[in-house]
Amino acid sequence: MTVDPRDGRRRQTHLAETSDAELGRLGGLWPDATRWLVGLGRAGRAEVLDAVAASLEASRAELVATAEAETGLARGRLDGELTRAILQFRMFGDVLRDGGYLEAAIDHAGPTPLGPAPDVRRMLVPIGPVAVFGASNFPFAFSVAGGDTASALAAGCPVVVKAHPSHPLTSHASAVAIESAVSRLGGPPGVLMLVYGQEAGLALVRLPAIRAVALTGSLAAASAVQTAIAEREDPIPFYGELSSVNPVVILPGAAMARGDQIAEGLFASFTGSGGQLCTKPGLVFVPAGHAGDGLVAVLRERVASASGVVLLNERIRDSFLDGRARLEAAGARVTASPDVAEEPGFTVAPTLLELDLPEVSDEIFDECFGPVTVIVRYADVTDLDRVLASVPPSLTGSIHLDSDDDPGTVRRLVDQLVERSGRLVFNGYPTGVRVSWAQHHGGPWPSTNSLHTSVGATAIRRFLRPLAWQDAPEWLLPEELRDGCTAVPRRVDGRLELAQP
Amino acid sequence: MTVDPRDGRRRQTHLAETSDAELGRLGGLWPDATRWLVGLGRAGRAEVLDAVAASLEASRAELVATAEAETGLARGRLDGELTRAILQFRMFGDVLRDGGYLEAAIDHAGPTPLGPAPDVRRMLVPIGPVAVFGASNFPFAFSVAGGDTASALAAGCPVVVKAHPSHPLTSHASAVAIESAVSRLGGPPGVLMLVYGQEAGLALVRLPAIRAVALTGSLAAASAVQTAIAEREDPIPFYGELSSVNPVVILPGAAMARGDQIAEGLFASFTGSGGQLCTKPGLVFVPAGHAGDGLVAVLRERVASASGVVLLNERIRDSFLDGRARLEAAGARVTASPDVAEEPGFTVAPTLLELDLPEVSDEIFDECFGPVTVIVRYADVTDLDRVLASVPPSLTGSIHLDSDDDPGTVRRLVDQLVERSGRLVFNGYPTGVRVSWAQHHGGPWPSTNSLHTSVGATAIRRFLRPLAWQDAPEWLLPEELRDGCTAVPRRVDGRLELAQP
């Protein structure tokens, strides 16, 4: 079944929940799929990723239209997101061609203070079949055609995506686009597959052949997956991108110098995509008094005159309404919220909540997915130290500063944010995660459950494991570990060497 | 209490189990210790590691004598192990000076297909206080002065080691040597600390400030730690180096060409250090017939004329006797075992067990810590495929081959071992782990519980987490991420650049 969140209409689809028998059949396809992916080598897999990117591009019109009807997200946003998903496949193609991700290292045999030492060579190898749980809020970039799929295929691992129930047809169309690129290049079935249904997803996690799980979703979803992993004989790595309140600190100097502009930026950041981004700023610390008043006044005005927002599904709509009510119960006052028609479909009103720092309790720090943010007014920057220590660690921590703001204070607050964030944003907004080599999209619990990133070049490392070869005959070594190879950067006898093109 | 395993004598020590109150006091020392370690920077921490190495060297006589009385390990072995521990501190000093471990990356701001992108810079930062559980079998190199401590301190993390009850005085003396080096350089208390007692160790794991746990030990110990982690509010990474049977495959050509030599190598490898190494070869596949017979005959002779071996403690002795009995019950026959006096102390006889491949059941694959190995005779190399698929994944997989052995067979067996090993050893023995940049000491479950190494330069990554800075003012960036810095290798706009000395 698929639901159009713009009008709440339900339609049957041809996509049935995956049965245990079907799951067994999928598992049988992995050995061939793995052999094919690994056998292609880096250059071959880069070609596959490029072909997938081209195939997604060729299906753009169908993909965007399908996603629009299933998510209620704006066409422009979906168009941009698909571009981003395509770029991710191309980026991992570049990562493969570069080869640095292999972390190739060679220590030649030789004398040491402990006697003669053997030749030891190390590099990363694919971990094996990967289960991916697609996110509701990114039907492309964190779903079937998302970064988890791109990085796992790049690593050489077959992928099974548990399709998100909010966009089954988009998931299916994405898989068709990817599979067609794979099969045009001679790939066997089983390189990318889908399962449908919650039970099938958890059964997938319990399959012995699955070697890692990646999930972008809620703490509750992560807990269900963790329980399934605990039922396995062996533990497997679980990469969860979970809950994040993304605090933003506006320092007095910044509020004074450009309060209006910051208000506009915050409005765009917390309402964009219906506030349904994991990096949405959910908590904004604004100075009390004149400078902060100006910023807040502009923000209230923008929110009060905003349109209604269609949320992704009924559960998210209900959970938004509950969450907003909980924030109010915790003492936050609604200071702006337009009157919008909430029928038909899952439309809600963007909402601004406010309270003063002395009124803050831990309940204020609960993530509320959707177009809402909480403004906390502080009288003195020194009060921020204490309160920031209570804010749950997040994917991001943002700070707006100006030359008027005291450098010592800034340094202290940044040090606090370092402890509790995966990405520090200066004079900006946490939404809009750049896809690039240096990106890190992760952070301490509860923003993620391990030390990983799900965006950026190093996301590939989640699906690799180290392997060492000791005194191996040259013909049994991977090409990248043979003495003459100059195709990839390597650490030889402790010294890093660049690739020679 | 400390026990001399050579005669079983128990002596009281001044070292009491750590109380909850004391644990609370330790926790209070971490903020200062962290600030000091981080504030030192890479060069400063490298100096600390060098000073620790020198301090351990200066205490060599006392350390080795203390460990000898507590472990029953031979003086020469302990001397070598201390040298190895010292080298580990020096190696991580080199790792810090090199700076590549930071994985520094810079993506400058610029236009992209998704619009203008911000400046993003990433590098690894310390994870925070680390709990280490020392191993029984390496009183230096995997204990208080071990690689976990060296790599965590290098990363910038304070360390608390739960001292192994088999060598409390060695643990204490090691801590004194490390602490004296730290305090000579002006370090505060809390950089390295010890706790004593099982309960205190688990209470340590539950302390909110602890950010990671490293353990070298049994599956049972790992399970207790995992349970303690599950009682925390937040999950933390747990790096366990656990159980490993380390299969060795002798191919017919190799057995024919140098059976005697292989027998000698195997004997040394499975009896060295009393067979109490996590890389001990516990399972050896030897061809049936003439070539294999010669090898096995030499091995039997060496074992039959061997002396008794003192095991580390009473529990390990009991568990060795139980394990050997279980292997016999599973159908392995004792074919060589000298008569040795088993009193006083924890002395046992090195033992050779044998059976034919068709007799093999899964019970034969249980790790038995101590001087025992199981020889499995195979009639046809093609039979090895099936049986290797049942051997539990291990830290190592070894293969002995000769030019006579069929390359296709070798390739197939190596592919099997790749799936199930952390290190492949060719024409050698798995014991004796080289400490070097390219080393990997890990492997799939049950050899470890995550994708880590506990030996080699990349062991430091266990105690680091990625952090990204977006549009940060230069003065707030770490030195290694500023534009002009050439001190460390970096990936700038996707291109790897070497450090400029």
Image (tube, coloured by chain):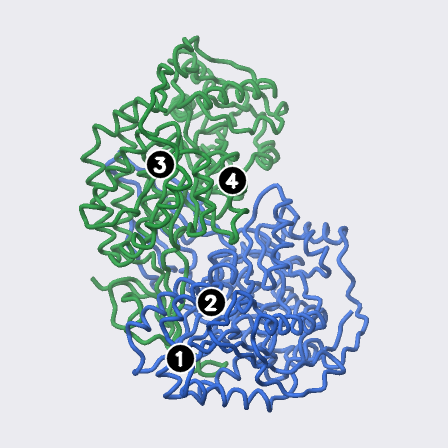
Chain colours: A green, B blue
Q: Give above or below for A401 relative to B258.
A: above
Q: Residue furthest front?
A: B358
Neighbour tally class for label 2: few under 14, some 14-19, many 20 plus, Cα within 10 Å = many
Q: Is residue A428 visible?
A: no
| Tag in front: 3 or 2 | 3
Report the amino acid beneath label 3: Ser
Say which chain tag 1 marks.
Answer: B
3 and 1 marks in contact (CB < 8 Å)? no
Q: Which residue is mark 3?
A: A143
Among the 4 quarters of the image, the one containing residue B321: bottom right
| Tag in front: 2 or 1 | 1
Residue B427: which disc? 1
The alpha-carbon separation of the residues under discs 2 and 1 comes to 22 Å
4 and 3 marks in contact (CB < 8 Å)? no
- Secondary structure beneath disc 2? loop
Q: Nearer the viewer, residue B241 or A454?
A: B241
Q: Nearer the viewer, residue B233 or A288?
A: B233
Q: Are marks 3 and 1 on the same chain?
A: no
Q: Nearer the viewer, residue A191 or B233?
A: A191
In primary-sequence order, the first of circles 2 and 1 is 1
Say which chain tag 2 marks.
Answer: B
Q: Which residue is mark 4?
A: A417
Report the amino acid beneath label 2: Gly
- Secondary structure beneath disc 3? loop
Counting from the top left corner in percent of width and height, residue A393 is at 53, 38
Counting from the top left corner in percent of width and height, residue A452 is at 44, 47
Q: Are marks 2 and 4 on the same chain?
A: no
